[in-house]
Image (cartoon, grey):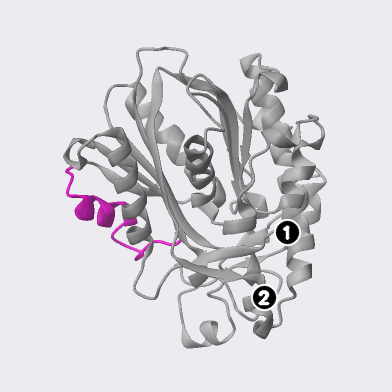
Amino acid sequence: MSIVSGSELTTGKMKNSPTLTGRSRLGTLTGIEIAATGSYVPETIVANEDLAALGCDSDWIVQRTGILERRRALPHQATSDLALAAARQCLQRANVDAKDVDLLVVATITPDHSTPSTACHLQRQLGCIAPAMDVNAACAGFMYALVTAGHFVASQTARNALVIGAEVMSRTINPQDVKTYPLFGDGAGAVLLRPSANDRQGLISYTLGAEGCGGQMLCVPCGGSRMPLTAEAVSQGQHYLQMEGRSVFKWAVRVVADSTRDCLNHSGTNVDDLDLFILHQANIRIIDSAVADFAVPREKVFVNLDRYGNTSAASIPLALDEAISTGQLKSGNRALMCGFGSGLAWGTAIIQL
């Protein structure tokens, strides 16, 4: 299979490839609301200094990523356990009983098992009777899941849709990879979607997209049908996440800026109209570079990666829950959310709370 190189992808030299705007359809999904949010992070904190024994340099981590610490799941905790804690908090805040949840969508790349889905494990643990499915779009996963569930609610096929991003990334990264291992953490965030009588609430503009030609830039080579898990593959570390950091960085900055511009233009929104930017918490340099063209005031750019690191699909719902809980986002506010990562895939939306 021929795959376009990372350099071709980041410089926009893909053959027969139109611009980002031309490849990504933009949509509007209103008449829905976020009834409540919830989150959960494991109690174990791993500071940069704790990684020194592995050969990781604390100063390098801070300067290159902005990460000071991250959370680690306990040995007995799986992704569904983190998702369950976030879901219960979300439902409690919404005053909704689990039996009234009629759709579960879980975004994750670290499922409890290959099958059944993590969503089915969560459905069983919550005790609800509802369709349940996983979405695998890595760090863009929550945005994919949010749009998917939003369409169910907007079409009146679900009234209480629970959308969760949950990851135990610590089990996918190689402790010997000193440039990748410090980046990731574990956690979960949840959102409850339901219909709104206000047809101005919801996603006033959104876009989802993928550039699969860059898939090799951020991948786990072993463990699927292409390369089954074998003792030899494990001995070579092929079951761990592998990343071409420089190429991913360039792609991420481009795709965040382009998709943000697309959503702003589609919705007729100015940057000044936005109350908060919630970008995937991967790297502070990506965040800073991506918003630089828009002259966004620092106080409007949400950051918590210093405490949690990159939690993949959990990143945006964790940030959203914290922003709402601390009063940085209130009813009537507008926020831009953007997830981007392995696939390569992205999802960007302007949401009216």
The amino acid at mark 1 is: Thr
For the question of whether residue 133 can be seen, the reply is: no
The answer to whether residue 114 is above or below residue 6 is below
Q: Who's the residue at 46% across and 83% down the image?
A: 230
Question: Is 118 a magenta residue?
Answer: yes
> In the drawing, what numbered circle is on residue 8?
none
Q: Residue at x 54, y 30 (%)?
A: 329
Left or right of residue 72: residue 259: right
Location of mark 2 (residue): 49
* Residue 221 shown left or right of residue 20 in the figure: left
Q: Relative to the observer, which residue lies in front, 147 or 302?
A: 302
Start-end of magenta stretch: 110-129
Which residue is painted at 24% across and 50% down in the image? 123
Residue 322, compared with residue 42, is above or below; it is: above
Q: Quadrant of the N terminus?
A: bottom right
Q: Which residue is mark 1?
A: 65
Residue at image x 39%, y 76%?
75
Q: Is residue 64 left or right of residue 170?
A: right
Q: Quick check: 309 above or below 339?
A: below
Q: Amino acid at mark 2?
A: Glu
